[in-house]
Image: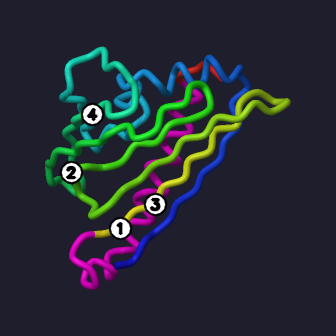
Amino acid sequence: MRLHEFRATDTIALPRDRVFAFFSDAANLEVITPPELRFRILTPQPIAMHPRALIRYRLRLIGVPFEWVTRITEWNPPHGFVDEQLAGPYKAWVHRHRFLEVPMGTQVDDDVTYELPLYPFSELAAPVVAFQVRRIFSFRTQAIRRALGV
């Protein structure tokens, strides 16, 4: 078993309540995901966000379609929340979102810990997976800014 970590930080020039409201609307996941992933939420919307809320998605990675199911394991508005994969492409995926008030607006921190399936063979693909995760979050940063008009 080998855990991988990804961290990203961005500052959005808006109040924390407004930024958190954007992130707490699951429909915005489709807006902030690169279009080539063909990300679609399968769970009927609107989705009530709370601890134990489940969200089902369908997307494609490298052209291969699959479902991804996550559970909200922590919900602490407007400070943050945690989603964990129950089913999907990773052996484990935990994504912690934190929202901090700062003089310039809201600091958004993403901490992701993931484990690839089929260890140790999957470690050969780890650099490619890490590149893809960075690329997706880079797209996400720009898409969030466009959606929020900042």
Q: CA distance from mark 1 to mark 4?
A: 20 Å
Disc 3, SS? strand
Q: How many marks?
A: 4
In the rendered image, residue 47, in percent from the top left (x then y), is placed at 31, 20
Q: CA distance from mark 1 to mark 3?
A: 7 Å
Residues marked 1 and 3 touching at CB (< 8 Å): yes
Q: Which residue is mark 3?
A: 113
Q: In terms of sequence position, does the residue under pointer 2 or pointer 1 come before the other?
A: 2
Q: CA distance from mark 2 to mark 4?
A: 11 Å
Residues marked 4 and 3 touching at CB (< 8 Å): no
Q: Residue at x 40, y 41 (%)?
A: 73
Q: In terms of sequence position, does the residue under pointer 2 or pointer 4 come before the other?
A: 4
Q: Which residue is mark 4?
A: 54
Looking at the rendered structure, the kind of residue marked 4 is Leu
Dot 2, crowdedness within 10 Å: few (<14), some or many (≥20)? some
Residue 133 part of the magenta-drawn span: yes
Query: Which sits in the foreground, 81 or 23?
Result: 81
Range of residues picked out in magenta? 117-146
Q: CA distance from mark 3 to mark 2?
A: 15 Å
Q: In terms of sequence position, does the residue under pointer 4 or pointer 3 come before the other?
A: 4
Looking at the rendered structure, the kind of residue marked 3 is Thr
Left of 63 or right of it: where is 70?
Answer: right
Looking at the rendered structure, the kind of residue marked 1 is Glu
